[in-house]
Image (cartoon, helix red, strand yellow):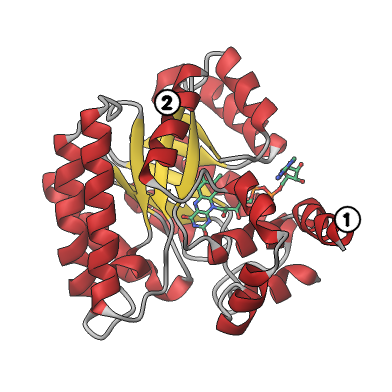
Amino acid sequence: MLGPVLLAASRSDRMRKIVAAAPVTKPVVNRFVAGEQLDDAVGAVQDLDARGMEVTLDFLGEDITDPSEALRTRDNYLRLAEALKDAGLGPRAEMSVKLSAFGQALTGGHDIALANIRPVVEAAAAANTTVTLDMEDHTTVDSTLAILEELRREHPQTGAVVQSYLFRTEEDCHQLATSGSRVRLVKGAYKEPATVAFQDKREVDRAYVRCLKILMAGEGYPMIGSHDPRMIAITQEMARRFGRKLDEYEFQMLYGIRESEQERLVAEGHRMRVYVPYGTDWYGYFMRRLAERPANLAFFLRSLVSRG
Ligand code: FDA
């Protein structure tokens, strides 16, 4: 029952101030976020690379309300692409972006976001890497997929994310399961109404498996974004069934979550990409992680009590 409350809190400015000011918050945040600076992000890529993992980097930020903040996001990603290029890490680390941080929710936001993201996609290509467009709440899906289509004209390796909790997603998977198309399948992390999304976790899981089947049977490159052991086992089974080799799909997990499982999959020869967030604007991301899993929330609450 706490999940929806935390998801609502993830978009509350008042809660943001309270949580950010609590002295115990920082060490807990550090479990899920690589650090505040670009150097921290590059360090995390080097560390994960040494352990056989690939990375997708997320410069934290979302729901911006001012065009200057969108430019700040763009410039931070341009610096990131430059740093990956200089360190020769492009082939090991791509970038994940939230278009709401590029201005998508501003008036005329679709065009603003497209104009701001385009140079980042170009810089990624110059650094020998690519960009994946994270998916946010359901009101943004049409715009995000239209921006994806536009970017893929020149940069077909640009990746998409689809969320199995949305009713529309099976159809989106059919559209996206084409040659060269990189698609990350996740369950979905936002609070969505019953008019557009499954509310029951078992329904979301069943939809995940249906979407997985479409992607694994299709011609694109599926990226399985889940920590769920059942989804991982089903993916492995489907890979066998559809004759996909180990380099024809990949697993993705979040930084700091199920690290031993990440290592186990690498040891089995799988491609494993870790989603590494960094930056100071960690609040929304952090609250969604707490909402997802009672154990994460319990960890946070225990540290509150032990400090108190
Ligand atoms: P879920 O939370 O349903 O848990 C299922 C089972 O997995 C649990 O019962 C447990 O067995 C195991 N498990 C989960 N977490 C565990 C833990 N911490 N320790 C031990 N076991 C654990 N969402 C979105 O809306 N837009 C996006 O763009 C993205 N992007 C994204 C990228 C990547 C790489 C990942 C992994 C996830 C996202 N997400 C996302 C988040 C996603 O939608 C979802 O909220 C979380 O991944 C949680 O769902 P899971 O499938 O991981 O398992």
Residue at 48% across, 42% down:
276
Residue assigned mark 2: 46
Q: Which mark is residue 306?
A: 1
Does 230 sit above or below residue 238? below
Out of 286 and 306, give the one closest to the viewer: 306
Would residue 280 appear left or right of 262 to someone viewing this image?
left
Out of 219 and 31, give the one closest to the viewer: 31
First in sequence: mark 2 vs mark 1: 2
> Within 10 Å of the Cα at label 2, are there few (<14), some (14-19), or many (20+) other Cα atoms?
some
Q: Is residue 156 visible?
A: no
> Within 10 Å of the Cα at label 1, are there few (<14), some (14-19), or many (20+) other Cα atoms?
few
Amino acid residing under circle 1: Ser
Residue 266 x/y as whole percent: 56, 19
Residue 106, located in which quarter of the rendered image? bottom left
Out of 156 and 281, give the one closest to the viewer: 281
For label 1, the SS is helix
Residue at 36% across, 44% down:
38
Out of 239 and 149, give the one closest to the viewer: 149
Residue 191 x/y as whole percent: 61, 72
Residue that protrudes farthest toward the left in the picture: 154
Image quadrant for the N terminus? bottom right
Residue 124, located in which quarter of the rendered image? top left
For label 2, the SS is helix
Q: Which mark is residue 173?
A: none
